[in-house]
Image (cartoon, rainbow, N blue to C red):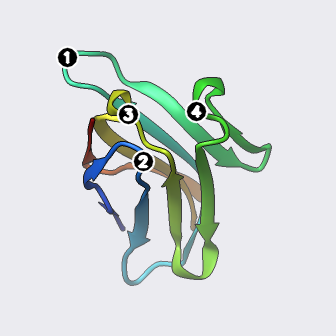
């Protein structure tokens, strides 16, 4: 099973992007249990952006109202919708997914996608 992120790129301030994080694999049945989205600006620490799981969905206070998390369980894909983007949103964005697989839980990390917001 692997995790593939997509949807990053260059956008002007005020624009929107939707990041996708898709789990795929063959031979095993799995489902998404929970997802965390993180971001890491260049030279800075990685911060939690949003999380979604059995306890609900939470978005970082400073991003609430602009960022939302959704999921398509049929496609084993989770999304981070980012609206009204600002230059300070520029960062490498990562997803981390907990999968229900077999009798256990598998945690996977995406490789990250770069989001660049120009002024």
Q: Secondary structure at mark 2?
A: strand
> Which mark is first along the chain, 3 or 4?
4
Seen as rendered, the residue at the extreme top is: 44
Q: Which residue is mark 4?
A: 63
Mark 2 → mark 3, Cα distance in angstroms = 16 Å
> Which mark is first along the chain, 1 or 2?
1
Q: Position of residue 46 (x, y in %)?
A: 36, 24
Task: Tell me what residue is drawn at x 36 percent, y 27 percent.
Answer: 88
Q: Which residue is mark 1?
A: 43
59 to 43, vertically: above or below:
below
Task: Tell me what residue is drawn at x 52 percent, y 34 percent.
Answer: 49
Could you say which quadrant of the image residue 100 lies in?
A: bottom right
Mark 1 → mark 4, Cα distance in angstroms = 20 Å
Q: Which residue is mark 2?
A: 95
Nearer to us in this view, 110 or 92 = 92
Taking 13 as reference, is 104 left or right?
A: right
Mark 3 → mark 1, Cα distance in angstroms = 14 Å
Q: Neighbour class for label 1 at 10 Å: few (<14), some, many (≥20)?
A: few
Q: Secondary structure at mark 3?
A: helix
């Amino acid at each position: 099973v692997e995790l593939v992120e997509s949807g990053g790129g260059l956008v002007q301030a005020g624009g929107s992007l939707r990041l996708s994080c898709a789990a795929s694999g063959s031979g095993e049945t799995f489902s998404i249990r929970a997802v965390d989205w993180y971001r890491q600006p260049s030279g800075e620490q990685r911060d939690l952006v949003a999380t979604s799981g059995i306890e609900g969905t939470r978005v970082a206070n400073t991003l609430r109202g602009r960022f939302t998390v959704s999921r398509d369980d049929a496609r084993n894909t989770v999304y981070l919708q980012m609206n009204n983007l600002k230059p300070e949103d520029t960062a490498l964005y990562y997803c981390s997914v907990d999968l229900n697989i077999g009798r256990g839980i598998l945690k996977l990390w995406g490789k990250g996608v770069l989001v660049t917001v120009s002024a």
